[in-house]
Amino acid sequence: GAGVSQSPSNKVTEKGKDVELRCDPISGHTALYWYRQSLGQGLEFLIYFQGNSAPDKSGLPSDRFSAERTGGSVSTLTIQRTQQEDSAVYLCASSLATGVRHSPLHFGNGTRLTVT
Amino acid sequence: ILNVEQSPQSLHVQEGDSTNFTCSFPSSNFYALHWYRWETAKSPEALFVMTLNGDEKKKGRISATLNTKEGYSYLYIKGSQPEDSATYLCVFNQAGTALIFGKGTTLSVSS
């Protein structure tokens, strides 16, 4: 498809397990963002990739969270030793290389993570 | 810490009413402001990207204005319809920083 694709759409995991969330951006979009929305909260920035530059990891809430982007395309967000407070909807978005000054974000449908 | 405030937090109107919401953001080093509509069970969808002070953008019954000097943007919906029910997100971009999302205004339109 032509949109941002995220998988899985839903993930239920036990506390302490590791999870991997995947994002496939729109072809040609070099900027990729991860956000999450916890229950009753707004969207929280996690990490931003732009081309080959070092990612902006300033939003990652703890060292249990990491993300990588292989070949400038697909990105994986990994959460190690999941905790209940990690339960949220994790959204991925991409935009054109020219950045958000003229290009809107295109969002995936999100991954709903539930940690039991 | 950069803060983006949206008000009201939620709003309930009758079909046919016109309404507006506010997004407040820091007025220094302005780069861009976006508005998104986020319907339940869907992903956020871009409405407007605004970059210049005094910008006015329109899409059907929805329009937005931008004042970068005083740090606010208004989103207007004329003649609200039930399909306008959604959360409206304001996203602020200051030069050199990551995008900052407001918490949104949730609009509910009754027929």
Image (cartoon, coloured by chain):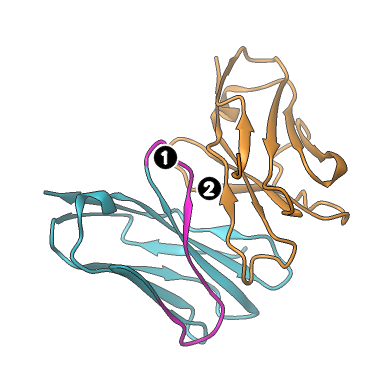
> In the picture, which quadrant includes the C terminus of chain A?
top right
* Neighbour tally class for label 1: few under 14, some 14-19, many 20 plus, Cα within 10 Å: few
In this rendering, the answer to whether B37 lies above or below B7 is above
Q: Answer yes or no: is residue B75 visible.
A: no
The residue at the point 60 percent across, 29 percent down is: A86
Assign a secondary structure to mark 2. strand
Q: Which residue position holds label 1?
A: A40
Tell which chain the image draws in cyan.
B
Q: Chain of mark 2?
A: A
Q: Nearer the viewer, mark 1 or mark 2?
A: 2
Of the residues shown, which amino acid type is indicated by label 2? Leu
Horizontal and vertical percent position of residue B52: 55, 84
Magenta segment boundaries in residue numbering: B40-57
In the rendered structure, does residue B52 fall within the stretch colored magenta? yes
Count numbered badges in the picture.
2
> In the picture, which quadrant includes the N terminus of chain A?
top right
